[in-house]
Image (cartoon, helix red, strand yellow):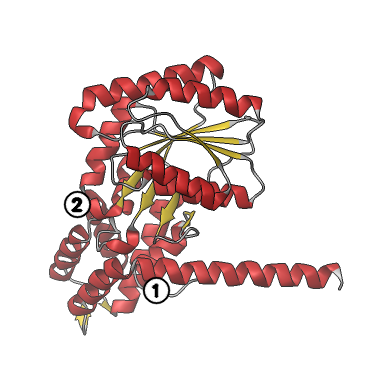
C-alpha cells in the first residue's frame, strides 16, 4: 500500500474517532443542551429579538449555570448583531455556540508533556467525590496508550477506599501504584514516589491527594507540605497542579476553584461528570472568570471517556448542534 493511501486511511480513522467522540460528548451534554434548546425554541418561536426576548434568554443562560456576568456578555453581543431582527431558534443557538467557542478557545489547552521533565510530575487536587482518582486512572490509560511509563502515588492516605480504587485503576492501565498504610504521611509518600519515579525512569508521576474541605487549614498545610517535599527533589515540580471539578456541583465549582487557588498553584482544570448534569454551562462561566486552562472533560464511566478539551466541539454540543 502506498504512503498516500496510508495517510488517507489514518486521516479517515482520526476523523472517525473525532466524530465518535463528538457524539459521546454531545450525548454527555444532552441534559444541559436539552434545557437550553427547549428554552431557546420556546423564546424564539416566530419572534423578533427584542429586549424582552433578550431578558428571557439571559435568564435561561443563568439557569444553565453559565453565570450572570457571562450570560450578560453573551446576550449583549446578540443584541449588538441581531436586535430587532427576525431570528430562528437555530440562528440563536448557532450564534451562541460561536460566541461560547470564542470565549473558550483561549483556555482550551491539552497538557503538553514534551517539555523535557522526567518524571513529569502531576499533583491532582479537588474535593472528595469530584472524581480525582478516576480521572488519574483514565489519564494514566491515555498516557500509557502513548507509550509513557506512568507511576501513580496514592496520596489520599486517609481514605482506604481511594487507595484501593487507585490500585484497581493501576491494574486496568498497567501503571504501577505506590501506596502506604492508611493514615501514613502524604508528604512522605510523595517524597518516596519522586525517588522511585527517578530511579525507575518513569516518564510521568501522578500524585493523588486528599480533598477534605471541612478542615481546610489541615488540608492546606498537608498540600503545601507535599509541594515542598516534591520541590526538594525537583525545584521545577510539580509541573502540573490539576484541579478536578465535578460539573454536577454547578456554581459551587467557582468556590472550589477559589479555595484551591488559595492552597496551591493550580495550573489547569479537568471537568468531570458532564453527563450527569444539566449544569454543563458552568464550564463557560469558569473559563470566563478564572482564565485557567481547561485540559480535559469527562462524560462517563468508561476508561476512554476523558478526552482533551475542544472549545468548538464543547460549544456546539452544549447548544445541541452537529459538529463542524
- Between residue 293 and residue 157, name the one nearer to us: 157
| Residue at mark 2 | 68
Q: Is residue 63 above or below residue 15?
A: above
Which callout, 1 or 2, points at the residue further toward the start of the chain?
2
* Residues at circles 1 and 2 in contact by the CB criterion of under 8 Å: no
- The residue located at (34%, 38%) in the rendering is 160
- Between residue 227 and residue 303, name the one nearer to us: 303
Residue that protrudes farthest toward the left in the picture: 52
- In the picture, residue 39 is in which quadrant? bottom left
**How far from the left and from the top, in percent, is residue 239?**
52, 30
- Between residue 206 and residue 247, name the one nearer to us: 206
Mark 1 packing: few (<14 Cα in 10 Å), some, or many (20+)?
some
**How far from the left and from the top, in percent, is residue 215?**
20, 28
| Residue at mark 1 | 321
Q: Secondary structure at mark 2?
A: helix
Q: Is residue 160 above or below residue 230?
A: below
Residue that protrudes farthest toward the bottom in the picture: 46
- The residue located at (42%, 54%) in the rendering is 297
Q: Secondary structure at mark 1?
A: loop
- State the CA–CA distance, disc 1 to disc 2: 23 Å
1 or 2: mark nearer the eye: 1
Residue that protrudes farthest toward the front in the picture: 181
- The residue located at (23%, 74%) in the rendering is 40
**How far from the left and from the top, in percent, is residue 30?**
32, 70
Judged left or right of residue 91, residue 303 is: right
Amino acid at each position: 500500500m502506498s504512503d498516500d493511501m496510508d495517510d488517507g486511511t489514518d486521516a479517515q480513522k482520526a476523523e472517525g474517532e473525532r466524530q465518535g467522540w463528538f457524539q459521546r460528548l454531545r450525548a454527555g451534554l444532552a441534559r444541559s443542551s436539552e434545557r437550553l434548546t427547549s428554552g431557546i425554541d420556546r423564546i424564539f418561536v416566530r419572534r423578533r429579538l427584542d429586549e424582552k426576548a433578550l431578558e428571557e434568554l439571559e435568564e435561561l443562560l443563568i439557569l444553565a449555570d453559565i453565570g450572570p456576568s457571562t450570560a450578560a456578555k453573551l446576550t449583549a453581543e446578540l443584541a449588538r448583531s441581531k436586535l430587532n431582527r427576525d431570528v430562528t431558534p437555530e440562528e440563536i443557538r448557532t450564534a451562541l455556540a460561536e460566541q461560547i467557542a470564542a470565549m473558550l478557545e483561549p483556555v482550551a489547552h491539552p497538557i503538553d508533556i514534551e517539555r523535557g521533565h522526567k518524571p513529569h510530575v502531576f499533583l491532582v487536587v479537588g474535593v472528595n467525590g469530584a472524581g480525582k482518582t478516576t480521572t488519574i486512572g483514565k489519564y494514566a490509560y491515555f498516557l500509557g496508550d502513548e507509550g509513557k511509563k506512568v507511576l501513580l502515588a496514592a496520596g489520599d492516605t486517609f481514605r482506604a477506599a481511594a487507595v484501593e480504587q487507585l490500585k484497581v485503576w493501576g491494574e486496568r492501565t498497567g501503571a504501577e501504584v505506590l501506596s502506604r498504610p492508611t493514615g501514613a504521611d502524604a508528604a512522605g509518600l510523595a517524597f518516596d514516589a519522586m525517588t522511585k519515579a527517578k530511579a525507575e525512569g518513569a516518564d510521568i508521576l501522578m500524585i493523588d491527594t486528599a480533598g477534605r474541605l471541612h478542615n481546610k487549614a489541615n488540608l492546606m498545610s498537608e498540600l503545601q507540605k507535599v509541594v515542598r517535599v516534591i520541590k526538594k527533589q525537583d525545584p521545577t515540580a510539580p509541573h502540573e497542579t490539576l484541579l478536578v471539578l465535578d460539573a454536577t456541583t454547578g456554581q459551587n465549582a467557582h468556590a472550589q476553584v477559589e479555595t484551591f487557588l488559595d492552597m496551591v498553584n493550580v495550573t489547569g482544570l479537568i471537568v468531570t461528570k458532564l453527563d450527569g448534569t444539566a449544569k454543563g454551562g458552568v464550564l463557560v462561566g469558569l473559563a470566563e472568570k478564572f482564565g485557567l486552562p481547561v485540559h480535559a472533560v469527562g462524560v462517563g464511566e468508561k476508561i476512554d471517556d476523558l478526552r482533551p478539551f475542544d472549545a468548538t466541539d464543547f460549544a456546539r454540543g452544549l447548544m445541541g448542534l452537529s459538529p463542524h
